[in-house]
Image (cartoon, helix red, strand yellow):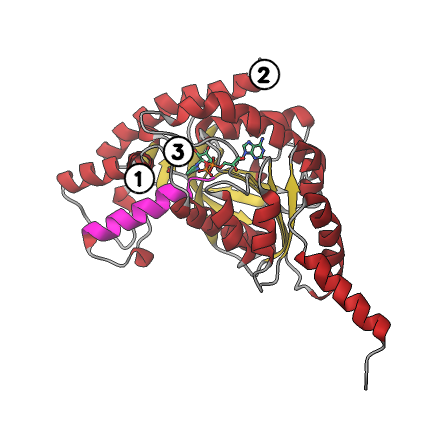
Amino acid sequence: MQQPLSDVNQRISRISAHLQPPNLQIEESRNLERTNCRAKGAAPGFKVAILGAAGGIGQPLALLMKMNPLVSVLHLYDVVNTPGVTADISHMDTGAVVRGFLGQAQLEDALTGMDLVIIPAGVPRKPGMTRDDLFKINAGIVKTLCEGIAKCCPKAIVNVISNPVNSTVPIAAEVFKRAGTFDPKRLLGVTMLDVVRANTFVAEVLGLDPRDVDVPVVGGHAGVTILPLLSQVKPPCSFTAQEIDYLTDRIQNGGTEVVEAKAGAGSATLSMAYAAVKFADACLRGLRGDSGIVQCAFVASQVTELPFFATKVRLGRTGAEEIYPLGPLNEYERVGLEKAKNELAGSIEKGVSFIRK
Ligand SMILES: NC(=O)C1=CN([C@@H]2O[C@H](COP(=O)(O)OP(=O)(O)OC[C@H]3O[C@@H](n4cnc5c(N)ncnc54)[C@H](O)[C@@H]3O)[C@@H](O)[C@H]2O)C=CC1
Ligand SMILES: O=C([O-])CC(=O)C(=O)O
């Protein structure tokens, strides 16, 4: 049977609308239509926003989250380039509906209704810089984004990637406290890359498959605050004193190794996107109610005298539901812990006073 001409014309005009060059206004209205259509048939899942989605981490992170079957809606927010990234990622034939948001005026729309917000927004290091050198720019960026979260999705789980994590997480906490929305279980600094690196480097030394290795990394996410607990590696193993020095130094300086290799073109992006997705997936599985989801993260904590500390946490329906103690440390790790705490104390205080000042 022949289709009526009006149906054919409607179809052609729908297709040609899709072929217009990316333009945010067009994207916005088309996205609304598409989302409304596709959301009906979409599998139930979680709504995830990436803030800083057009960046070196943001783009591969968006790609990998679009592939995650637990994600039903993916919001990509940045101050530049989101129309292109969104158009590109939205062609992937996976379940999540993708929408792009550009600039501060669209931040609230990007955040409304989100279950998980991942923040890789901000400037990365160049050779010779410390993570703390990024504070000046990134502190303000994280503050603004967290104000949006407090207003539009105060119950969302928040994964902070932007450096210096040791200060940006306390900044986020202070913003949420001020807004009356702070729930320590829902705010997690992402230290997963330290664990990913530790698993890789330890596996190399032991001649194992990195997927079979689990190294707890505690403390924070900068230099000596990154404390791998090599005495607690699974499977149980032992190292020579020389191996311990080599591994500790390599894990603590893994970020600098990448910054120097990239020679001014930024810091870790691909391994970070992998680590961020591994962590976000654990958060989503926790939200779904899976049991036994344990990962390291930098969270509000009473494990030490410091208000924030990275340790293993159990992720559940409400975020970091249980924070595990450090476990038995050897003398080498006890010395490392004191150094880590000394540096962390200053970085945490710097973040807190940025908001309280
Ligand atoms: N936690 C961790 O383990 C790691 C953290 N990082 C940190 O992640 C951050 C991002 O790194 P890259 O993606 O390599 O940097 P990038 O410069 O490639 O991308 C950052 C993105 O943030 C966007 N942005 C800037 N201001 C913004 C704002 N106000 N709102 C939304 N987006 C904004 C930029 O437009 C850019 O697209 C850096 O601070 C870096 O140090 C990097 C690697 C590991
Ligand atoms: O080193 C940097 O600046 C980026 C980072 O946090 C990492 O790769 O661990």
Relative to 189, say whether 47 is above or below. Answer: below
Is label 3's Cβ within 8 Å of ligand 1? yes
The C terminus - image quarter: top right
Magenta region:
190-205
Q: Which residue is mark 3?
A: 221
Q: Which mark is residue 356?
A: 2
Q: Residues within 10 Å of mark 3 (few under 14, many from 20)?
A: many
Question: Dividing the picture into quarters, in which one does residue 243 lie?
Answer: top left
Q: Which residue is mark 1?
A: 228
Q: Which residue occupies the extreme bottom position in the image?
A: 1
Give the residue type at disc 1: Pro
Please indicate, yes or no, whether residue 59 appears anywhere in the rendered image: yes
Give the residue type at disc 3: His
Mark 2 lies on a secondary structure that is helix
Q: CA distance from mark 3 to mark 2?
A: 23 Å
Residue 50 magenta-drawn?
no
* Residue at (50% x, 23% y) in the render: 137
Number of callouts in the render?
A: 3
Residue 203 magenta-drawn?
yes
